[in-house]
Image (spheres, grey):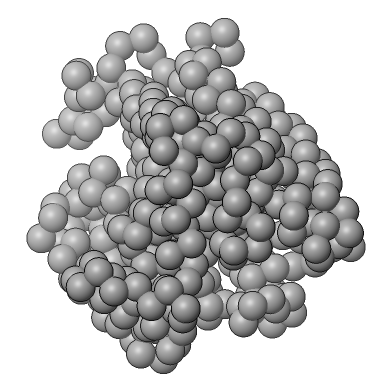
Amino acid sequence: MNRGDRWLVVLPLLLTGLGVVMVYSSSAILGITRYQDPNYFLVRQLVRAGLGLLAMLAFARLSLRRLEAAAPALLAIAVVLLLVVAGLGHMAKGATRWLRFGFLSLQPTDLGRLAAVVFMAWWLKRRPPAELGFARGVVPPLAIIALLAGLVLIQPNLSSAGLLGLTGFTMLFLAGAPLPALAAPVLGGLAVGAFMLKTHPYEMVRVETFLRFVLSGELDPRGAGWQLDQSLIAIGSGGWLGRGLGGGLQKYLFLPEAHTDFIFSILAEELGFLGATALFAAFALLVWRGMRVTMRAREPFLFLLAGGLTLQIGLYAIVNLAVATGLAPTTGLPLPFVSYGGSALLANLAAAGLLYRISAANASGEALTRQRWAREGA
């Protein structure tokens, strides 16, 4: 365990600590207004961060052989929980995404995306798509991912379902599936996305608002573009050094979801361009170290597992930051480690612990330079 890449522990913990600070700064006013308690969200985030730390420690010591053997069971548990939330879940803001257990709540989507990566790594190790072809090597794993994504989609949660599908697609590519074989799944995913936009008007409004902003600069600041307008005001008013920690103004109920989906906007307002750049650098370094672990993986399961986990963290960060800066339509995806939330924080810290565990198990040289397992059976 001493040989593990410590950056994979240090960076997630630093981002989580920053998240606790920013959650308090961005939510104190909302806590006073809604619950008469400025520490309402802070206390809950501290509890979740503590649970996440325990999850990181547990996964950093996990037996990789046992995890590989448990992959089908983990997928089955995720499917059952997604089915339960579809029928008995708690609805909020028009979506049914949560299971309530007393004062705790769980989003099975976060367990599902973690289980999906573990299962895909298990499946693709045993059934390499490059050897089995399209019908036997590409279609079956994509069908399983489509099932999970479909259960997420009916909540409805188009953004999470899309990133789950993209993760499965990329893991297939890492496993050696040829690009022409992946063209049909891409077209199928685009067709499903178009159908969801057509049948869910609020999602179509978000896309239309984004396209109008990109193509003409019009934002509709008193209508559908209010949230993005307030986000851009927060980011732009931060300047080089920001207003100072706690000195932001948009969190005074101007910017909705300031402590969750748009926490980056408050960070940029209070810590400025330099603080935002440091955040970008932290995520870039984390993704780089994750890909370094992937390249040094000693066998296919670890290679695919590390690649899938790193990809998920990177994708969620990119999409969240793109939404906050007007480079993508508004979604409900949190910023990994930083945004307020329980299930996502637990899943991301568990993934970081697992990446550290894989790095400790890796050989000292890079497997890709030797192509050791990639040529097995050649």
Q: Residue furthest left?
A: 180
**Percent of width and height locating residue 179:** 13, 55
Horizontally, is 88 left or right of 239 in the view?
right
Vertical position of residue 321 compared to residue 222: above or below: above
Q: Residue at x 34, y 23 (%)?
A: 292
Vertical position of residue 253 compared to residue 322: above or below: below
**Percent of width and height locating residue 251:** 63, 54
Vertical position of residue 3 compared to residue 266: above or below: above
Q: Nearer the viewer, residue 242 or 11?
A: 242
> Where the C terminus falls, by quadrant?
top left
Res. 295 in view? yes
Q: Quadrant of residue 270?
A: top right
Q: Quadrant of residue 65?
A: top right
> Where the N terminus falls, by quadrant?
top right
Q: Residue at x 46, y 41 (%)?
A: 238
Q: Nearer the viewer, residue 233 or 77?
A: 233
Res. 48 in view? no
**Percent of width and height locating residue 183:** 15, 66
**Percent of width and height locating residue 31:** 79, 56
Q: Quadrant of residue 367?
A: top left
